[in-house]
Amino acid sequence: MAAAHPAPAGTGQTIAGALRAAAAALAKAAVPEARRDARVLLEAALAAGPEVTVGDPGRPLGATDAARFRGFIERRRRREPVARIRGRREFWSLPFIVTPAVLDPRPESETVVAAALRHVADRGPRSAILDLGTGSGCLMLALLHELPTAKGLGLDISPAAVIVARRNAEALGLARRAAFVVGSWGEAIAGRFDIVVANPPYIARPAMAGLAPEVVCYDPAIALDGGADGLMAYRALAGCLPRLIRGGGFAVVELGCGQEGAVADLFAQAGLAAVEAVPDLAGHCRVLVLRAGSNQKKIGNRLIPD
């Protein structure tokens, strides 16, 4: 049984009471998973974990913590994502700093990391990794975490995003093996790499307005907008990837739902064959693995040539 606590002066509210009120306010604002978000934000306000919010519901909430929590709940009521309020997001079981300059890393993007690791024959090679449109750096840094002798280069058109990626590399202890530069896709890169990863913007511009408020109002538009048909970035990648992939190397690119055929066609025309189409946990084709001079791969009902 949780211990009884006297309420501190000026609040009169316990953790359980604060959670109930916050969850009700979020539910009234039609925020999905209101109770969970309220708990996570209270833990952030208290700099504590479930051992406090779940294990000690009768604990009084101090005035400073209560004010911080109210501020967090008000921001969530305006549909600001929880990760942005907290300033961090877990990806590949690693903590990443997120700011308004970068895309909030999605769980489905872990499919890119998993696919890349499956195509690395040995977890100890001295692989050179290139991350095009690196954002927070989550893809490349997750790979460097798993491949301790690899080195990586992350490229992003946004100087502010590059700063965030460098901060994440430092925080994760990977800065000695990670470099980041400002540039547009492969234009500023002259070398060749064993592994190239990319999560390009793939939302068709007419569909942008229909995105959830958490996305359209808080993620940078440059990381979402894929042009009129959602394929603008893939055309740019098809123009540079063949010269960036070292012999025996491969690329892993993330896709929007239903784009696998069109994207595979674009890369096939550039001489890169899709050797694997990988679904995410929801069953949507999320990733294509590309190699030069490989056998054709059936994508849906279509054969993609070498």
Image (cartoon, helix red, strand yellow):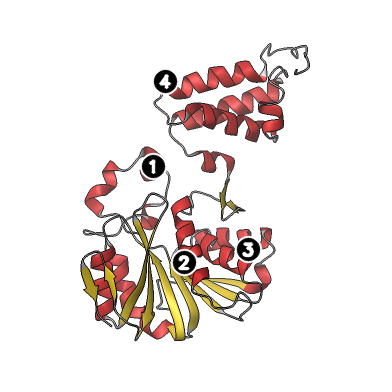
Instruction: Please report contact status of discs 1 and 2: CB closer than 8 Å, yes or no.
Output: no
Q: Quadrant of residue 301?
A: bottom left
The three-letter amino acid code for the residue at tag 4 is Lys
Left or right: residue 11 versus residue 113 is right
Q: Spatial distance from mark 3 to mark 1, Cα to Cα?
A: 27 Å
Q: Spatial distance from mark 3 to mark 4, Cα to Cα?
A: 39 Å
Q: Position of residue 167 (x, y in %)?
A: 62, 59
Q: Is residue 19 above or below residue 273?
A: above
Task: Confirm whether residue 189 shows in the render.
Answer: no
Q: Which mark is residue 157?
A: none
Per the image, label 2 sits on a secondary structure element best described as helix
Left or right: residue 235 versus residue 12 is left
Q: Which mark is residue 28?
A: 4
* Residues packed near mark 4 inside 10 Å, few (<14), some (14 to 19) or many (20 plus): few
Q: Spatial distance from mark 3 to mark 2, Cα to Cα?
A: 22 Å
Q: Is residue 195 above or below residue 279?
A: below
Query: Nearer the observer, disc 3 or disc 1?
Result: 3
Per the image, label 3 sits on a secondary structure element best described as helix
Residue on which the image places disc 1: 217
Q: Spatial distance from mark 2 to mark 4, Cα to Cα?
A: 40 Å
Q: Position of residue 82 (x, y in %)?
A: 52, 38
Residue on which the image places disc 2: 115
The three-letter amino acid code for the residue at tag 2 is Ala
Query: Nearer the observer, disc 2 or disc 4?
Result: 2
Per the image, label 4 sits on a secondary structure element best described as helix
Q: Is residue 282 above or below residue 172?
A: above
Q: Position of residue 248 (x, y in %)?
A: 46, 86
* Residues packed near mark 3 inside 10 Å, few (<14), some (14 to 19) or many (20 plus): many
The three-letter amino acid code for the residue at tag 3 is Ala
Instruction: Please report contact status of discs 2 and 4: CB closer than 8 Å, yes or no.
Output: no
Query: Nearer the observer, disc 3 or disc 2?
Result: 2
* Front one among 297 and 64: 297
